[in-house]
Amino acid sequence: MDDHGTGVPAAPGFAFKPTLTGELTLLRPVTVDDVPALLPMFRDAETARLTGDHATHDEAGLRAWYASRGDQVDRLDLAIVERATGNVVGEAALLDWDPGNESCAFRICSVPGAPGRGLGTEATRLITGYGFETLGLHRIWLEVYAFNPRARRAYEKAGFVPEGVLRGALLWEGERVDAEVMSIVAPEWFRHRGRPEAAAPGRSAPGAL
């Protein structure tokens, strides 16, 4: 079937769960079998703070959640696998799909010890690229809290641009914390493909003569 009768093949949609391969990481559909590897992520106090997660997660609930990810037709949940070790080191997701506006949100989370090795940045580029190049999205957005500048820098490195601030969006241990909204839109992605510094004026894009 083509898209609106234009002869352009329709995008596969969120029901299809791809495997995406990079140099450092492989992203594949997350399953209930990944719960033991991801469990430390839900039990780490610093991860909960940085993601603003007030919930308490038990293993039975997590197993039910991850067992249902493959059935979702309006979001994409992928496990991040470190290729060098074969270990699951986190998850990346496209969610809050708004088909009428060709937009969705992005989130990523890593197990303790995984950040700082470039795995998250590559995973971000892989799933974001899939969103634009295969799903045909126009906008992918995220929120990052003010006390997580490391994540903000990583998102900027992958091409996300600050849009605005949600003031006092999170209440954490008695403190109101701002959340910054960041996004990439399709024209930006196809200009730099997740590497805005390489595509900056005065620098040759990869493959340019």
Image: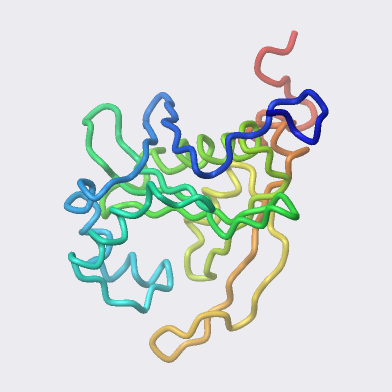
Asked whether, in this view, residue 151 is left or right of residue 71, the answer is right
Q: Is residue 87 left or right of residue 124?
A: left
| Residue at figure coordinates x 51%, y 35% from the top left | 126
The answer to whether residue 54 is left or right of residue 179 is left
Total labels: the figure holds 0
Q: Specify the farthest residue to the top.
A: 209
The residue at the point 68 percent across, 28 percent down is 1
Q: Position of residue 171 (x, y in %)?
A: 47, 85
Q: How is the image coloured?
A: rainbow
The residue drawn where x is 48% and y is 38% is 16
The image quarter in which residue 195 lies: top right
Q: Is residue 72 left or right of residue 113?
A: right
| Residue furthest bottom in the image | 174
The foreground one among 197 and 101 is 101
Q: Is residue 113 above or below residue 96?
A: above
Residue placed most toward the observer, 23 or 156: 23
Which quadrant is the C terminus positioned in? top right
- Residue occupying the far right of the picture: 6
Question: Foreground residue, 60 or 39?
Answer: 60
Q: Residue at x 68, y 53 (%)?
A: 99
Task: Measuring from the top left, give residue 55's x and y in whole percent.
Answer: 33, 77
**Along the viewing direction, whichever of 97 and 88 lies nearer the viewer:** 97
Q: Position of residue 80 (x, y in %)?
A: 35, 41
